[in-house]
Image (cartoon, rainbow, N blue to C red):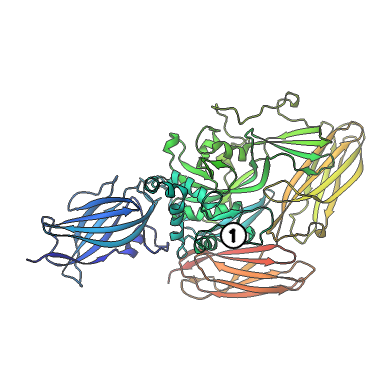
Amino acid sequence: MDEFKLQSINLQQMENQIQHNTEGLSSSTMVLRRGQPFTILISNEGRPFDPMKEKLIFRIILGPLALDVPVSTFGQPSLTQWSANLERSVPDPTAPRGIAVSLFSPASASVGVYTLQLRVENRRTVRTYLFGQFTLLCNPWCQADSVFLPSEELRNEYVRNDFGLLFKGSSENIIARPWSFDQNEKGILDICMKLLQLSPQHQADMGRNLQNCGNPVYIGRMISAMVNANDDKGVLMGKWDGDYNDGVQPSKWSGSGDILRKWAETQFSPVKYGQCWVFAAVMCTVMRALGIPTRVVTNFNSAHDTNKNMVIEEYYSETGEKLSIGKDSIWNFHMWVESWMKRPDLGQGYDGWQVLDPTPQEMSGEFFRCGPAAVKAVYQKRVEAQYDVPFVYAEVNADVRTIILRDGKILSTNVDKNRVGSLICTKYPGAMRMQNITSEYKNEMGESTPRTLNTNEYFLPARSSEGANGRMTPQGIAVHLQLLRAPVVGENIVFNVNITNKDAVPKLLKKHVNAQSKKYNRNPTGTFWEAHDDVMIGPNETVTITHEIPFNNYMLKETEEDYLVNLAVVIEDVKSQERVLATQEFSVRSPTLNIQIQNEYVVINKQLVATVTFTNPFSIPVSGELTLACSGLQERFQARLTIQPRETIRVPVSFTPRMAGAKMIYTSLVLRSPPIILHGFRTINVQAA
């Protein structure tokens, strides 16, 4: 008697991945998105498939979890559970018969690497066939998925785009830093899936963890913890003390691919070293690879409120030196990511962007992680909402109390309610420029929307002596600092001190100006330049005094891509002992590299020449290593260079784009003396052949 015999299986990987918007991702398996069907072709010999004589049953396996899905010959696929439907007869030139089966995964299915088997049952025999594996991702194209994003433009930006800009420096002098997310590079998706499998939650209870991996809120918390290596087999070890001899200095990383590959190649040992922008950029890569729309966000003047009183206290000496007192701090900038997802656990109104922060600052639920904190909950001051809303709220809204001390005694104090969270930004969709998103966190007055709170432990009432606005500003003198031009490494820093006498009598003043170098995440170190002198000022007069800090005074000691300065001036009225303080923190940016393209019409698989141009602005020769790469490529160009004073170099680099679409060419030059890192980037649109 003639039998139905399975001859071959065709997963139709290319066709399915195009349908599932995963054709750019590289994996050892077929890559699919949940919430939509995928088609498999089955060729058979012998008689045609007869549903009355045999059953086809797919077994879908995820770790210890397994589900049997019988093939139905009629009806529509279920939208809430796995299903399989016979599509049609398929003429196959290599076999007498063929059938097509459409498998459908629910939009809530777990993200993971699945094994697919087929069982053919009849009255006499049961035969099992292994189809192979497929990786299932979230689906922002599917309306039923909790990460659904309605705009195709935004899906392209926040899921498929493999390059971007990170914004560093200070809000007065923003530095746009190119970064290659690399989620499309060979092997990166498989490495990202390893983060799910190596998490403490997975090790503790594999089955439960895999079931929870259908929820992007759960995934976000897990990845936030796994990107740092503080309490697990995470990707990156953080370091901020300047000694990076046993690893890579954070400023030297230019893409996530190198970091993730190094983590995998070293048997998942933590990669040394990362800081906030590296942690955030790597997390952005992982979340985009998993199909969760994600963007990197910078918060300028980001508060780290360790005692949860919503007040950051800063102390200065009477001569303008900032003192390292207290555990609270203000980071010049801090980066986290926002991921797009529904938040049914918070009730209505909190879907959309959620803050996730992998930089290890505070513990959340026994691990170093933060979020997802709904941006709308931060805006509405819903500090009781999970997860970690109070911490994020403080980062963008804490008050700053500035105190001038002498011998431990307070000479004056001032409260600034607008400095923290002065600018919150991200890359603009579809363009290499900044998008200001401050209004998504704060209203126009610079504070979150008032709302009745369930807790008051995060607020410190203003001292009664400070008045209604919480300020103790001297009435007779006003002072402010003014940079005359954007500071650039190699040039002198030039600024004005503007002093106004608001009284109708002349005054003798003492002026103390102090400049300190600082790290972006902590209080400044010792003074590297200062000026002290007396000033006579007439009634109602404004005096402008220009100062210039020579480059030699702030020469860098360790390799940096931007140098931060805390500048302060204290003006003392000799007669009244009244003191007023003005401060400004700013970045001294590095010179930039220029990239020129020989032919603006760029075609896939056709050689391209990019020329890097740089003029040495220093009065000494400089030497260092030049690197050029393109997003979506693993190949890169490296060369050692020596450049004479004021010399202009032009370095042509040939490479071949392997992927169509918008791509970024990025370059860096790491100099040894002065020890700075220069960057440049250019976007190209690679056309299909």
Which of 236/609 is in front? 236
Q: Which residue is mark 1?
A: 178
In the picture, measured across the screen, residue 105 lies left or right of residue 157, that is left
Q: Is residue 292 above or below residue 94?
A: above
Q: Farthest residue toward the top?
A: 464
Q: Position of residue 619 (x, y in %)?
A: 80, 68
Q: Position of residue 64 (x, y in %)?
A: 33, 51
Quadrant (top left, top right, bottom left, bottom right) of the C terminus? bottom left
Q: Position of residue 161 (x, y in %)?
A: 49, 58
In the picture, measured across the screen, residue 214 lies left or right of residue 82, that is right
- Circle 1 packing at 10 Å, graded few (<14), some (14-19), many (20+), is many
In the picture, measured across the screen, residue 527 lies left or right of residue 364, that is right
Which of 487/485 is in front? 487
Could you tell me which residue is drawn at 22 percent across and 49 percent down? 76
Q: Is residue 101 above or below residue 81?
A: below
Q: Can I make out residue 68 in this image?
A: yes
Quadrant (top left, top right, bottom left, bottom right) of the N terminus? bottom left
- Name the kind of residue labelled 1 in the image: Pro
Q: Can I make out residue 153 in this image?
A: no
Q: Quadrant of residue 665?
A: bottom right
Could you tell me which residue is drawn at 60 percent across and 29 percent down? 457
Q: Quadrant of residue 559?
A: bottom right
In the picture, measured across the screen, residue 531 lies left or right of residue 487, that is right
Query: What kind of element bears circle 1?
Result: strand
Q: Quadrant of residue 127?
A: bottom left
Q: Farthest residue toward the left?
A: 1
Q: Position of residue 401 (x, y in %)?
A: 72, 35
